[in-house]
Amino acid sequence: MLRSFVVVGLAFTGAVVSQAAETGPVHRWISQLDNEKFAVRERATSDLIAADHKAALAAVVRTAETGSPESRLRALHVLAMWHRSDKNSRDAVNATAKKWQEAKNRQIAGLGKELAAKTKPKPIQTSTHQVHSSAWVTSGVIIR
C-alpha cells in the first residue's frame, strides 16, 4: 500500500510541475511574441532575453520551430541574444543550431543555418585595421 501512495504522490507532483510550466511567465512571454500590439511583443522579447536560458530554452526552441512567422523571428532573435550573453547560454544555442542543421526536415535545417549565421562573429572594419566584433576600439587601442 505504501508503494502505491508514493506513486500517486509522484504523479500528482508531476502534474503540478507540468501545469506550472504551462502557466508561468515563460509561457506568457512566448504567447505574447505575436501579440497584435508592438509594445507587448517587444516587452515579451526583452523579458525572454533577460530570462535564464535554462528555464526558457525548450519553449523558445519549440516556438522557433513551430510558431507563427512573427514569433519564430522573435524566438530566433532571443536565441541570438542569449548566444552573446555568457558561455553556458552560447553553448546551449550552439548545440541547438547544430541539432537543427543536422535535421532531415529542410525547414528545421534552414533554421539551423539562419541561427548559425546570426551568431557568427562579424569583424568590424575600422579606418586603419580590422578588429574582431568582441573587442572594443577606443582611440585606436583595442580593449578585450
Image (cartoon, rainbow, N blue to C red):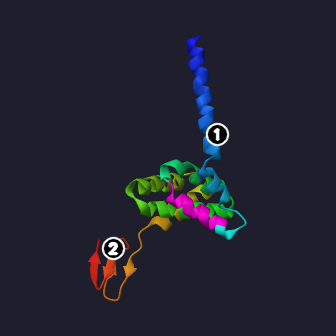
**Mark 2 burial class by Cα count in 10 Å: few <14, some 14-19, many 20+:** few
| Cα–Cα span, label 2 and label 1 | 44 Å
Q: How many marks?
A: 2
The x and y percentages for residue 26 are 59, 52
* Dot 2 and dot 1 residues touching (CB under 8 Å): no
Residue at 50% over, 59% down:
50
Q: Is residue 55 visible?
A: yes
Location of residue 117 in the rendering, given as x and y in whole percent from the top left corner: 49, 67
What is the number of the mark on residue 19?
A: 1
Q: Which residue is mark 2?
A: 135
Q: Nearer the viewer, residue 79 or 12?
A: 12
Q: Which residues are magenta?
A: 40-51
Residue in the image at 51% along x and 51% along y: 99
Q: Is residue 120 left or right of residue 5?
A: left
Front disc: 2 or 1: 1
Vertical side of 60 occupied by 10: above or below: above
Quadrant holding the C terminus: bottom left
Residue 127, image x and y in percent?
34, 89
- Prevailing secondary structure of the magenta residues: helix
Classify mark 2: helix, strand or loop.
loop
Choose between 83 and 128: the one closer to the eye: 83
Whether 78 is among the magenta residues is: no
Task: State which quadrant residue 48 falls in.
Answer: bottom right
For the N terminus, the image quarter is: top right
- Residue 11, image quadrant: top right
**Which residue occupies the foreground of this view, 41 or 110?**
41
Which amino acid type is shown beneath numbered disc 2?
Ala
Outermost residue toward the bottom?
Answer: 127
